[in-house]
Amino acid sequence: MREYLIYSKFCFIDGAFQEATLHIDNAKIASVYLGLNEINGLTLLNYSELIVMPGIIDPHVHINEPGRTAWEGFDSATKAAALGGITSLIEMPLNSDPVTTTAEAFEIKKEATQNKLHVNCGFYGGVIPSNLKDVESLLRSGVFGLKGFLTHSGIDDFPNITKVHLELVAPILKHTDLPLLLHCELDDNTVPQVNNTRSYREFLNSRPQHWETNAVDLAMEIQETYDIKVHIVHLSAASALEHIKKRKLDSSGLTVETCPHYLFFNAESIPDGSPIYKCAPPIREKQNNDQLWKALESGQFDFLGSDHSPAPPDLKQLDSGDFFKAWGGISGLQFSLPVLNTLAQQHDLPIEKILPLLTSGPAKFLGIDHKKGHLKQGCDADITVWDRTQSITINEDMIAHRHKATPYMGRTFFGKVIHTFVNGHQVVDNSELNKLSKGTLLLK
């Protein structure tokens, strides 16, 4: 169908649920009518009691193609995204081979997406010590920002940068007005000796909160000195929240995200020998998680991202249980919405407070809020339809990620994605993939 209507009593419009009818025409929202409005000759998709919302935008995903498709790949990742109600995602510059640190490498990555995008996909470029001469051309090639690590990234072809590199790249970022995204951990020699590599407590102690806090302070120093946009990815340390809050009072150039796994899991419940839970920065204690949730409730996070970072079972050390040898990354792209909906119910938080963190928040950060992240006239017809009350239990059969191992396996959540529309096409129908290759490249 090129032209049709979508109706629900619960359309998420301007931050609230409203009874409305959306007129979809040629991949756009042509009109929004309050109440039920039938138009002669047009099919009406009546989703009366279901939530109809802007398609979810996940601005932090590792897909690992080209070069490491044994880890994931555009085909499997974007299928999983669609099933999870995600209509647009932004892919990180590392774990692919080559890493996206030059305009030439970016061209290779774009070519690798051909006929594999089932949702829309954009990209960040990367900054490493050796590519400073390439940064400006990379930023002008269509990436949405520049990602760097302040500690080892996990792969040797994406080494970390230092304050010296930040000072060199900041003027270029200022000139292009694109954000610098930083993995904020600054390692030091204050961590205890490791005696048991299968111990989660020892792994947690090896990446303490002050690593994050110190790195966040450096990020904020660069942001203030050069007046550039700086984004702190996947914050896990609640100890950094007050620092960030104070800086945000003086500048709109600082933004921060956290991830569903930092809100849902806690260190006390992670068994030893279970590196399926390993990520960096690590999942911390329940008291820390509660502080993160309170920050979310009070509006301190600009948006949420999955930080989906999968790897084959052998790299995750699932047999040995060695946290220190295992690849660090949580596989959970498909389940952000039900996880967050379940948490909202547990904390008695209206879901209306969560949805902007998945839609309008990332759209604003990416500079695409004129066409995505909202149900309003002129926006792209990227739409997620879901049942907040229906429960799902995660099992291998429903997972579209290349590898099925995930810390969410076997858990029951509330919130089931029923339909997903990408550029007006019904990519997911009744929780099953319906149409493929309807996503497009997103370029800044």
Image (tube, rainbow, N blue to C red):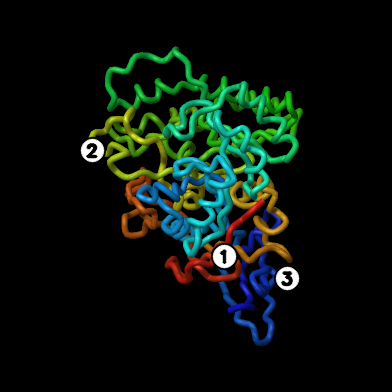
Residue 367 on image: x %, y %: 70, 49
Q: Secondary structure at mark 3?
A: strand
Q: Which residue is mark 3?
A: 31
In percent of the image, x 37 and y 46: which residue is there? Answer: 408
Per the image, label 1 sits on a secondary structure element best described as: strand
Q: Residue at position x 75%, y 30% from top?
A: 227
Q: Is residue 30 above or below residue 71?
A: below
Q: Which residue is mark 1?
A: 422
Residue drawn at x 63%, y 37% as measured from the top left? 135
Q: Give the CA separation, mark 2 to mark 1.
A: 39 Å
- Disc 1 marks which amino acid? Val
Give amino acid for label 2: Asp
Determine which residue is flagged by label 2.
319
Mark 3 Cα-neighbour bin, 10 Å: few <14, some 14–19, many ≥20: some
Q: Judge by depth and name the residue closer to the eye, 163 or 217.
A: 163
How far across and down, in percent of the image, does residue 246 sit?
70, 25
